[in-house]
Amino acid sequence: MASTSNPTSSSAQPIRHASDIVHQGPLYRPVLNPITHHFILFSDGALLGFNDPPVNGNYSYPDRTYYVAAVMEISDTSSTEFEIKCRMIPSGVLECKFCADSVSNRDLWHLALQGVVDAAAKNPNKAEVPKSSTAGNTGLAGLKTNVTFKDFEFVQYLGIGAYGQVVLGKEIETGKFYAVKMLPKKAIVLKNLFNNACNESRVLINCKHPFVTRMAYSFQTVGYICFAMEFGMGGDLFELLKRHGKFKVDDARFYAAEIACGLGHLHYHGMVYRGLKLENVLLDRLGHVKLADFGLCAENFDDKDRLKTVCGTPDYMAPEVTGWTGKGYGRAVDWWALGIIVYELIFGTGPFHTEKDDVKSIRNTEPLNFPTPLDTVTRDFIIRLLQKKPDIRLGSYTGDVRDVQNHAFFKDMDWAKLHRFGLEPPFTPKLKGDNDTKYFDQEMLKRKITLTDSLDAKMWDLLFQYQSEGPSNSDPNPRGASSLGTYFRNLFPRNSECEKNFTLFHLRSARK
């Protein structure tokens, strides 16, 4: 039975479900003889404490019951203690202090409680946290609010990255296959990736170019944001190079031409890709290039306001990205990466590849070497793309892609025919159907698909909503900005962009 010593409740709870849980974990009251209970926070504001974690989803008879009305500011950031105000039955408010088992868990509890309170304030007639933020204006491009995992039959893993995964999914209603990129909201929040995700969705939905991957739409679950993208059935250039071996110069020229066209399109629309590498050059069912993965893409680029963020894959990063010049960087970093790819396709390895962790030193100081003889035109093309000084690099002037296309390396290239898919690719995938994955990493394909939202997914969904909604036009101090701003400053103490990007939770283009 429910504890009669608890002034907030003296009766059994209504039926609750695991899907209504926002956060859970151990807490204790800072009293003379503290006893730790397993507390569960539900989306209607109920905070239930149990001597032991409930089994079989039975939450009807807690040992402690509180109804959260307000969350107080944390006064001592080094303490595990936090304070809330609870609604009493039938009326009144009780101030209660709790302690978590660590400062980081205190922050998670504080964040979850604040989210529940603010959700109740936003919907006073229904004090419940939405099960998903799909109905909100999140800033994600191409968002469908009525799509869930249940609308897909997931077939195989295609790839797993640092923060997300890509799965082959069949849309049940249409039978179409998509590469579904899934980013956990928890990772988006903790790794400061919200604006990056929004940027990527905008690029995928808006960039209409034959050599750039397109997105059909985006959708959300409680725990993930998902992009349903074109399925590059031919795999990627990394896998192709691994299977095929070194390419002839003419074949490398074809791929370089299609990549250059894609880069030129991005640059024309004010973007710097920053993600060009063999693994991000996909091939469609006919063998044509599709640039992919725009999480690092910078929007609204202006030559007068240089980029400063160090990001990208080390083997493909231009010297200026790591601050070698001290002047920031711009579109020329993408042409450097193209030079690396052309070199890799022809020689089978990168120009500055090393088994040791000193790629930066070699790239910035060592001269460019060619392991085998190469014709003078191709050699000059690679040398000019891999100029260490960006201001003399091919493609760095105002001509951008036109300067690259006008190099003698592309003397006989029919660009109009290339854009019409009129030129035959060096490699044409031999496919058995729309879901053929033979050109992907076979070890990756063997992985078992497990797509479930974590127990604390709802809490991260709440925070994702905070980041996406931005400040109210009528309220200069957005809901929870103070407490959540404090949370983020504590979470990212060394991040100079933290306060600007998170305190007011205002949607900005991730132009760093």
Image (cartoon, rainbow, N blue to C red):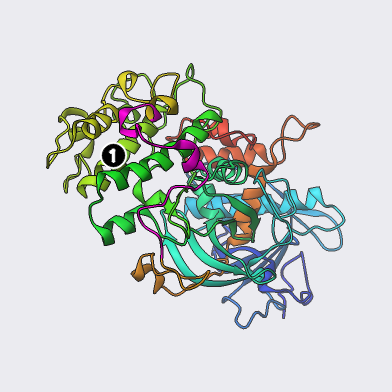
Whether residue 35 is visible, yes or no, is: no
Horizontal and vertical percent position of residue 55: 60, 81
The secondary structure that dominates the magenta segment is loop
Q: Amino acid at mark 1?
A: Ile
Q: Residue at x 36, y 35 (%)?
A: 412
Corner quadrant of residue 177: bottom right
For the view shown, which residue lies furthest in the top direction?
Answer: 304
248 or 237, nearer to the observer: 248
For the view shown, which residue lies furthest in the left direction?
Answer: 372
Q: Residue at x 72, y 81 (%)?
A: 1
Q: Which residue is mark 1?
A: 340
Left or right of residue 402, residue 204 in this image: right
490 or 280, nearer to the observer: 280
450 or 17, nearer to the observer: 450
Horizontal and vertical percent position of residue 21: 66, 66
Q: Of helix, strand and loop, which one carries label 1? A: helix
480 or 438, nearer to the observer: 438
Left or right of residue 255, residue 88 in this image: right
Q: Residue at x 39, y 24 (%)?
A: 403
Horizontal and vertical percent position of residue 191: 48, 46
Task: Say above or below: 501 vs 32.
Answer: above
Does the segment drawn in magenta span residue 95? Answer: no
Corner quadrant of residue 335: top left
Horizontal and vertical percent position of residue 250: 29, 44
Determine crowd level at label 1: few under 14, some 14-19, many 20+ residues with C-alpha closer than 10 A: many
Q: Which residues are magenta?
A: 405-429
Whether residue 465 is visible, yes or no, is: yes
Left or right of residue 243, residue 206 in this image: right
